[in-house]
Amino acid sequence: MTKPGESWVVMIHLETDHVTAEAFALALAEFTDAQMEFEIREDVWAAKGYAAEKPDLSGIETVVAIVAAGLNMDTPEVTLEHLNPIDWVARVYEGFKPIHLGRFYIYGSHLTDPLPASIFPLEINAATAFGTGDHGSTSGCLLALDDLLKRRRFRKVLDVGTGTGVLAMAAVRAGCPMAVATDIDRQAVAVAKENIRQNRLQHRISTGWSNGPSGGLIAGQSPYDLVFANILARPLERMSRDLARQVAPGGYLVLAGLLNRQAARVNAAYRRQGMVLQRKIARGIWTTLVIRRPG
């Protein structure tokens, strides 16, 4: 019988590109409760999955062999390891270190150290800390914001795919009067609302669910002079027309969640909407695009 807190990790030992590792991670979906591809070192990826009950190793090995054959590559080794009960909240707290990006300082709600001077502090609930600034796409957006704010002020900000709400909060904390933050994931909306409340910014940030960049909450304040969309490359391409329409003449659009090799394709989609690339920010394998609407 599995004890409370116990789990198992299945490791697929690879040294490959991100897309290939993702294919192997997806192959674990039938056998594990959570799957992920992860970076071993820059641009080199592997895959693993976690299960609450002991998974079928022979079944996993069979599926992995099928995937490898389909990709015309050697079958990678698969290992299964038992994990003892872990205090996951304590583990998350331990792993979430403060992040300093430009003038922004992002720290966990569990920390009590004095804040650095001359910064814009943002408190994030560490127990639900996805999108805290440590990821290359989020950090690229924060660096883009820090740079843009040195040149001009923004009155209205839109954050599409807000996650923890960190980008909307950063913009408002740095002096923008108001922001709208939306996400397609209702759990993310709940997390963002809580983080915004913790930072006492709820009176300046409107938060809600939206399936795309043209919902009612977004339309009510459109157009915006600064728009963030930290999602993924394909949705960014599909939404290029609607997102571009949310940007006021002379306004900026910051796009993230795309791999370096996807940047040119995404930029081309927005160039067709009349948008002009201003800057590219590379953070490891991730690229952030800063685009301007002429006017």
Image (tube, grey):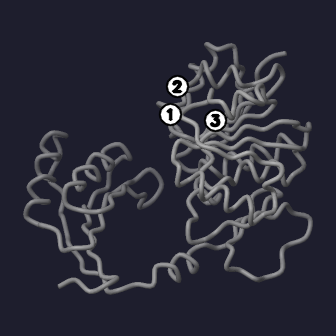
Question: Secondary structure under badge 1?
Answer: helix
Which residue is denoted by mark 3 in the rendering?
Answer: 255
> Badges 2 and 3: C-beta atoms under 8 Å apart?
no
Task: Categorize mark 2 by other alpha carbons within 10 Å: few (<14), some (14-19), many (20+).
Answer: some
Q: Check the picture and name the quadrant holding the N terminus.
A: bottom left
Identify the disc placed on residue 233: 1
Q: CA distance from mark 1 to mark 3?
A: 9 Å
Front-lying residue, 250 or 14: 250
x 56%, y 31%: residue: 212
Which amino acid type is shown beneath numbered disc 1? Ala
Which residue is denoted by mark 2 in the rendering?
Answer: 237
- Res 21 visible: yes
x 64%, y 17%: residue: 271
Q: CA distance from mark 1 to mark 2?
A: 6 Å
Q: CA distance from mark 2 to mark 3?
A: 10 Å
Asked if 64 appears above or below 258 in the picture, the reply is below
Question: Secondary structure under badge 2?
Answer: helix
Identify the disc placed on residue 225: none
Which amino acid type is shown beneath numbered disc 3? Leu
85 left or right, relative to 89:
left
> Badges 1 and 3: C-beta atoms under 8 Å apart?
no
> Badges 1 and 2: C-beta atoms under 8 Å apart?
yes
Quarter of image, res 129? bottom right
Q: How many marks?
A: 3
Image spot of residue 156 (x, y percent): 83, 36
